[in-house]
Amino acid sequence: MMASLLGTGYFPPIDGGIVYIEDINEHPYRIERMLLQLMQAGVLGRQQALVLGDFSGYRLAPSDNGYDFGAMLAYLRATLPLPVLTGLSFGHIPRRVTIPFGAQGRLVSGSGGFSLTLSNYPTVRRG
């Protein structure tokens, strides 16, 4: 959705954010292409980090020459102008975290992994 909204009035004007993406049944080279489009448009260069969730369900073809998610991840980490993190369980999976849009986030990463703290996100008041 982000790549398809690029250049329209619907693309959110966010600077200094944390970008979270996930997809299902999408080939790694297509994910790479969409992220490179966001990079070339200057979007990713204005963000603090990219967090990749679940990208399961794709099937490699012989013509993919083994270019799987791991190979794509290595290329993105070497190419994109921001940290690319994995390991946060969100997306089309049974056990997942909820990431509220518009929350304030603090992401700290290091060689042992990363921690994410979210605050000031909108909630529904009961009453």
Image: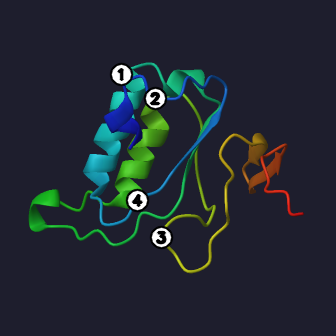
Mark 2 = which residue? 11
Horizontal side of 55 relative to 103 (left or right) equals left
- Residue 50 position, x and y percent, is 56, 41
Residue in front for this viewpoint, 60 or 23? 23
Q: Earlier in the sequence, mark 2 or mark 3?
A: 2
Q: Nearer the viewer, mark 2 or mark 4?
A: 2
Q: Secondary structure at mark 3?
A: loop
Count of numbered badges drawn on the protein: 4
Please rate how many residues cluster around mark 3, counting C-alpha atoms within 10 Å: few if below 14, some from 14 to 19, many from 20. some
Element at label 4: loop
Q: Which mark is residue 23?
A: 4
Q: Position of residue 32 (x, y in %)?
A: 33, 43
How far is disc 1 from disc 3 in space, using C-alphas? 27 Å
* Local secondary structure at mark 2: loop
**Which of the colour schemes (rainbow, by chain, secondary structure, one colour) is used?**
rainbow
Q: Quadrant of the C terminus?
A: bottom right
Secondary structure of the residue carrying numbered label 1: loop
Whether label 2 touches label 1, CB < 8 Å? yes
Q: Name the residue type under label 3.
A: His
Instruction: Assess disc 2: are there few (<14), some (14-19) or many (≥20) residues with their C-alpha within 10 Å of its C-alpha.
Output: few
Q: Position of residue 76 (x, y in %)?
A: 43, 41
Q: Residue at x 62, y 71 (%)?
A: 96
Location of residue 112 with respect to 82 vertically, above or below = below
Residue wearing tag 1: 7
**Front residue (pair 10, 2):** 10
Q: Residue 2: give x, y in percent of width and height.
A: 41, 38
Check contact, mark 3 vs mark 4: CB within 8 A. no
The amino acid pointed to by label 2 is: Phe
| Residue type at numbered disc 4 | Asp
Residue behind mark 3 = 92
